[in-house]
Image (cartoon, rainbow, N blue to C red):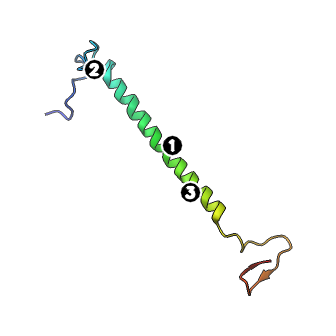
Amino acid sequence: MSKSSHAGRNELCPCGSGKKYKKCCELKQRKTRGATVMMIVVGILMTVGLIAGITAITSDRRDVARPGGVWSAEHGHYH
């Protein structure tokens, strides 16, 4: 028993186009699969970028020395 239920690569395409499967619907499936993978990769990169941006905006930077700043042990940050 074969893995898939579609026609073989060199058989006529089941969509009725008259073309071989490899020249018709198999190409469409490959293009769709590639687009799906690309969308997933772009989505992951956008999510990572968003998280990095939010982290950069909301991170507490009070403990970073500023020019002319003086550390306050009482308050735990630079003034």
Q: Which residue is drawn at 73% across and 84% down?
A: 75
Picture residue at 46% right of the left edge, 38% below the top = 38
Tell me the SS state at disc 3.
helix
Residue on which the image places disc 2: 21
Q: In what quadrant of the picture does the N terminus appear?
A: top left
Q: Which residue, given by chain and number where applicable, does mark 3 sit on?
A: 51
Q: Which of marks 3 and 2 is nearer the N terminus?
A: 2
Position of 25 with respect to 3 (left or right) is right
24 to the left or right of 73: left
| Crowding near the residue tagged with mark 3, few <14, some 14–19, many ≥20 C-alpha atoms within 10 Å | few
Q: Which residue is drawn at 84% across and 70% down?
A: 67
The numbered disc on residue 77 is none
x then y, percent, for residue 14: 23, 20
Proximity of marks 3 and 2: CB atoms separated by less than 8 Å: no
Q: What element carries label 1?
A: helix
Q: Which of marks 2 and 1 is nearer the N terminus?
A: 2
Type of amino acid at the residue the image marks with label 3: Ile
